[in-house]
Image (cartoon, rainbow, N blue to C red):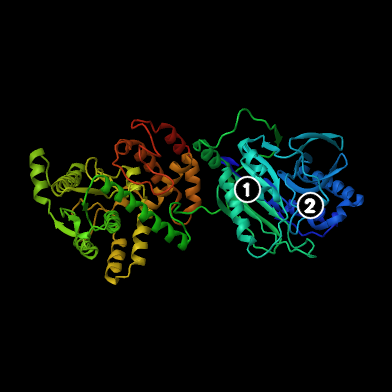
């Protein structure tokens, strides 16, 4: 539970219809299993103490009496268990029978959540046996205690105040206005659903989409526990399809037609961060539902959920390809609008033979196709200097040719040497002035060519470089429209790779794959034996690490120590802990010190969930102090 993680479990126990004693024993056995695995919030299926498919047996006094006694046996069994547990049970109040989910914690029944929407269509006829729950919470007397009874009860962890759990029952989530909506607005960060949803062809995918969508709508975690094979098959089959979702993502899902438990960890801190940012997620007036406290010990949750190394890049190839095509189109349409608005017929792209300028040229070519302008109107400018290698030079020239753009070669060695003489810079002094003078000379040429041709300079820098400040101020930092500004380096790679894989020209395909294999470098220092010596990732660190850090800083606002924990988990066996920490420190130092470069960025389209535009996602003072973040990092050593 430290750093906001809480382990949850969705359980389908082995059970028998109407055999309460057997069912209670199985529920207790699964409570043992799930608490031993560290689960702190555990959900069982709808009416699991009796079985959902009892039909008119629910009118039998003996079954209802045994179910109630069974509930309190389970409650007593939880006395030494450190978890909040929800079990489905039929419960009679004032002569009416209700379909409820009982919340149990340390030997107590904390409340009975009632089902709000009773299905009475198709294969369902719950109104034959049950009464819909009350509209608001009531207090009832049971076993010598007064407990809350009704919908949308909110259970709050004493040791983790932001862990607020609410429950709904099966059909509730399928309704037009699920009770979980109001519960989430009132503060619930985790919803459990005790369900008995039968299997028919096509229902699995619909159910999955429903639960994922509800967790996204509510900015919440969602634990869905479904009835399984133990239910009667007189007319229906239940598959035990359990789902754990978080903010639209399926964290864990069971195979159908099995029993047992699935586990994952809900990140409550992340959900809170999302709610803080989302100004449309707000309650009306004061809280109207009282919180019911429950107790669980605060401890470090062992992570089992998938933490991807490249959070900006979908792991599924089909999804990744679809997203790559979408991003390329967003970039191209953004540039198309700008060119139409400025009545611009030409574009100027500085082409180096590296990844970023390759992507920018590909996007520009796509834009010209959308505009119906011949690609020859794209001026692709290569400007070799002291660090240019033959490999990148040849790739720049060949790429321009294959895409049908117009190549312009302007060597800048002489111009830079004249500038060195003017400012008293030795060509043998390979310092920051030596490097930046080349970058600024290139930008000056591009800008002047754009003026000369009535064109527009297309920026090539990506979001990872902007985060690290790895750009020369008023050099490659500047353009007239930056098509890559919100694309992180790890995604740049996949966009170019996607273009290569979809390309029908074998020569262009081979050329793009060679560019993909070229080390990332600004090529500002002289090569050695014709090979690149200045490799960016040796100076600033691996981009896959920096993009990982950047994602969790921008997307969720995590503290450094939490990002370090996640990075160790994601990159375990690839990077040593001290290497991860080294580059995390470097990331924060550069991220804070280089904000001034991001405060005056050229326009560019947002393509993903986050960007560094000072007009959009990220507005940060250029002189903000890194002290708090540095202290958190120092404490890790």
Q: Kindly identify the residue that appears in the image at 79 percent across and 52 percent down.
A: 126
Q: Kindly identify the residue that appears in the image at 89 percent across and 48 percent down.
A: 65
Please say if the residues under marks 1 and 2 sit with CB atoms less than 8 Å apart: no
Q: With respect to residue 317, does 243 lie above or below?
A: above
Q: Is mark 1 on a helix, strand or loop?
A: strand
Q: Position of residue 81 (x, y in %)?
A: 74, 45
Identity of the residue furthest to the top in this view? 286
In this orientation, does residue 542 appear?
no
**326 and 611: which is toward the camera:** 326
Q: Kindly identify the residue that appears in the image at 59 percent across and 55 percent down.
A: 209
For disc 1, the marked residue is 222
Count how many numbered circles sit on residues in the image.
2
Q: In this view, does 169 lie to the left or right of 75?
A: left
Q: Kindly identify the residue that appears in the image at 27 percent across and 48 percent down.
A: 340
Q: Position of residue 426 (x, y in %)?
A: 11, 43
Q: What element carries label 2?
A: helix
Please identify, in this view, whether the residue under mark 1 or under mark 2 is nearer the observer: 2
Figure quadrant of residue 29? bottom right
Q: Is residue 619 left or right of residue 382?
A: right
Figure quadrant of residue 473? top left
Of labels 1 and 2, earlier in sequence is 2
**539 and 316: which is toward the camera:** 316
For disc 2, the marked residue is 126
């Amino acid at each position: 539970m430290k750093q906001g993680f809480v382990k949850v479990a969705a359980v389908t126990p082995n059970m028998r219809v109407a055999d309460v004693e057997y069912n209670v024993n199985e529920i207790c056995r699964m409570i043992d299993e799930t608490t031993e695995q560290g689960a702190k919030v555990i959900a069982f299926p709808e009416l699991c103490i009796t079985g959902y498919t009892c039909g008119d047996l629910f009118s039998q006094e003996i079954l209802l009496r045994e179910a109630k006694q069974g509930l309190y046996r389970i409650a007593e069994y939880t006395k030494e268990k450190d978890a909040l547990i929800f079990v489905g049970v039929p419960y009679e109040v004032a002569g009416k029978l209700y379909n409820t989910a009982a919340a149990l914690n340390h030997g107590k029944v904390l409340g009975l959540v009632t089902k709000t929407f009773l299905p009475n269509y198709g294969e369902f006829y719950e109104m034959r046996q049950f009464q819909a729950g009350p509209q608001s919470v009531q207090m009832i007397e049971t076993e010598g205690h007064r407990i809350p009874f009704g919908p949308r009860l909110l259970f709050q962890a004493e040791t983790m105040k932001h862990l607020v759990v609410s429950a709904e029952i099966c059909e509730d989530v399928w309704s037009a206005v699920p009770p979980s909506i109001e519960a989430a607005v009132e503060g619930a960060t985790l919803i459990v659903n005790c369900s008995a949803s039968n299997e028919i062809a096509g229902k699995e995918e619909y159910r999955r989409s429903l639960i994922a969508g509800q967790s996204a709508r509510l900015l919440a975690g969602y634990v869905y526990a479904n009835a399984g094979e133990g239910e009667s098959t007189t007319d229906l089959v239940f598959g035990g399809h359990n789902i754990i979702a978080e903010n639209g993502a399926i964290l864990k899902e069971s195979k159908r037609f099995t029993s047992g438990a699935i586990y994952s960890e809900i990140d409550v801190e992340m959900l809170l961060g999302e709610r803080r940012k989302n100004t449309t997620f707000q309650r009306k007036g004061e809280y109207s539902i009282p919180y019911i406290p429950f107790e669980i010990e605060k401890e470090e949750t062992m992570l089992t959920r998938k933490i991807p190394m490249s959070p900006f890049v979908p792991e599924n190839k089909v999804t990744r390809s679809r997203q790559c095509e979408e991003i390329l189109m967003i970039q191209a349409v953004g540039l198309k609008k700008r060119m139409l608005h400025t009545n611009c017929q030409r574009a100027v792209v500085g082409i180096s033979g590296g990844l970023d300028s390759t992507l920018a040229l590909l996007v520009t070519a796509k834009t010209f196709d959308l505009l119906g302008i011949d690609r020859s109107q794209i001026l692709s400018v290569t400007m070799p200097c002291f660090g240019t290698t033959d490999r990148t030079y040849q790739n720049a020239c060949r790429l321009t040719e294959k895409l049908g753009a117009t190549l312009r070669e302007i060597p800048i060695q002489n111009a830079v040497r004249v500038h060195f003489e003017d400012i008293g810079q030795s060509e043998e002094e390979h310092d920051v002035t030596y490097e930046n003078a080349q970058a600024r000379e290139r930008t000056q040429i591009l800008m002047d060519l754009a003026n000369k041709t009535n064109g527009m300079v297309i920026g090539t820098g990506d979001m990872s470089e902007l985060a690290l400040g790895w750009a020369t101020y008023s050099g490659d930092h500047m353009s007239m429209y930056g098509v890559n500004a919100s694309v992180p380096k790890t995604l740049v790679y996949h966009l170019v790779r996607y273009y290569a894989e979809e390309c029908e020209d074998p020569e262009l395909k081979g050329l793009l794959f060679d560019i993909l294999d070229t080390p990332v470098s600004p090529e500002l220092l002289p090569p050695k034996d014709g090979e690149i010596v200045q490799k960016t990732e040796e100076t600033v660190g691996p981009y896959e690490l920096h993009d990982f850090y950047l994602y969790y800083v921008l997307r969720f606002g995590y503290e450094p120590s939490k990002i370090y924990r996640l990075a160790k988990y994601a990159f375990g066996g690839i990077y040593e802990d001290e290497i991860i920490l080294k580059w995390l420190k470097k990331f924060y130092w550069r991220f804070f010190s280089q904000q001034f470069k991001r405060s005056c960025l050229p326009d560019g389209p947002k393509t993903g969930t986050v960007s560094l535009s000072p007009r959009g996602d990220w507005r940060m003072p250029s002189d903000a102090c890194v002290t708090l973040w540095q202290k958190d990092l120092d404490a890790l050593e």
